[in-house]
Amino acid sequence: MRIWDLHCHLSGVAGLTPEERLGSLLRYADRVGIERLCVYMGMKWVQDPTPDDLTRQNDDVLRALAKHSDRAFGFVYLSARHVERSLAELERCVARGPMVGVKLWVAKRCNDPQIDPIIQRAAELKAVIFQHTWFKTNGNYAGESTPDDLVELARRFPRVPIICGHTGGSWEQGIRAIRDQKNLYADLAGSDPTWGITEMAVRELGAGRVIYGSDSGGRSFASQLAKVHGAQVSEADKEKIFCHNLRSLMLPILKAKGIQA
């Protein structure tokens, strides 16, 4: 069964350089049968990055990709607080560079229309769009989006597929929040490997809208793979979740760039 991991980072992994850290991730991935990794954000994060922070972090990922382009895909890290620099990074890293997706984290909530030029340009480039989301019982970070915020964005771009990062952490609530917005996909990464998350996502969204990710190195590959391997869903559904759904979203930009996968 092919496995592509939607959600990986260069933090929390052994290595002094981006190349070494991605190499470490790939060694761990080989132990558990993961074929490809999607990597975003660099070696040192801040919740509200400056324009120069964005560029530095994307440079880290570009360095890592240059050494491991046969096994990893890069997503450009952007922020709706810095639209002009984000659009420039989209051109540098995706339009003219090797990256194939967009990563949006916490600096500004995604329901703010200020994000719209980024989404529009990413869609034109066929880049896969990933938005971090969370429902936190003790309150979200300043600028941190919830799945409800993402639904507002997705309604403005109903033909653009967008991935709901972590499915809001509190996954029962997150799955229900995105259920009726058909262009939203659930990312299984990051929460504890409790029983039922994959089963509920398949039941409520359909297997075609559920994507495996790990959030490594913040989480282990093994604990996150267990959510799908141990789920009481069909083997055909597991194949969709582990690879087919993500690969289908990525194929337009991979073909445009001449990347075989």
Image (tube, rainbow, N blue to C red):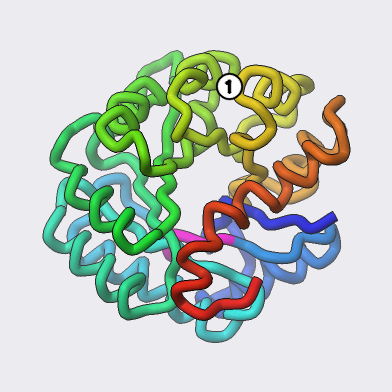
User: Nearest the camera: 17 or 172?
Assistant: 172
Q: Residue at x 30, y 28 (%)?
A: 155
Please state the extent of the stretch shown in magenta in the rendering: 38-43
Would residue 187 be counted in the magenta stretch?
Answer: no
Percent x, y of residue 113:
16, 35
Q: Look at mark 1 in the image and give the residue it sits on.
A: 171
Determine the secondary structure under disc 1. helix
Q: Based on the displayed image, in which of its 4 quarters is residue 196 positioned?
A: top right
Percent x, y of residue 61:
45, 71
The vertical placement of 186 against 241, above or below, is: above
**Along the horizontal axis of the image, is 79 left or right of 145?**
left
Q: Which residue is drawn at 35% across and 70% down?
A: 94
The vertical placement of 245 against 12, above or below, is: above
Question: Could you tell me if residue 196 is visible in this image?
Answer: yes
User: Nearest the camera: 79 or 235?
Assistant: 235
| Identity, as a three-letter code, of the amino acid under mark 1 | Trp
Q: Based on the displayed image, in which of its 4 quarters is residue 157 positioned?
A: top left
Would residue 41 be counted in the magenta stretch?
Answer: yes
